[in-house]
Image: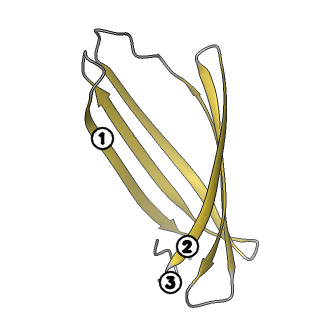
Amino acid sequence: MYFCSGELITFNVSCTWSSWANKYQLRFSGIGAGNASDGIYRLNEVDNYKWKPWIEGGTYNYTNVQTMAVSKDGEPVGVIHYTVHVTLNANGVQTATVDNYVFECFQ
């Protein structure tokens, strides 16, 4: 992905999650390198959610907005705003999906 500096950054991102009583927590962390600098980029995020499970025969809409902090060499450089939306029909078939990324630079 291209970030604030205009350089192409390749991230290796991991995600872990845990769930309990219709709630879950996602933890994202990643490390990346730019193609034009020697800097090390990191992204981090922890999100807690409450969700309603899909019930057979019913439709389901899910929207999630996340904000991931990005730093370079330990200094904050911006955030990645990420929105995902999924719609399932009564048969459980996915009928709509939206993935949208927006970058916000601090400099």
Badge 1: residue crowd in 10 Å (few <14, some 14–19, many ≥20): few
Give the labeled residue for mark 3. 7
| Residue that appears at 25% across and 36% down | 96
Q: Which residue is mark 2?
A: 10
The image shows residue 25 at horizontal and vertical percentages of 65, 33
How far apart are the two marked residues, 3 and 2, measured between alpha carbons?
10 Å
Left or right, residue 15 beside residue 104: right
Q: Amino acid at mark 2?
A: Thr
Q: Is residue 26 left or right of residue 82?
A: right
Residue holding disc 1: 97
- Helix, strand or loop at mark 2: strand
What distance separates the C-alpha of mark 1 from that of mark 3? 29 Å
Q: Is residue 2 left or right of residue 18?
A: left
Identify whether 76 is placed above or below 50.
below
Q: Which mark is residue 4?
A: none
Residue 15 in the image: x percent, y percent?
A: 63, 47
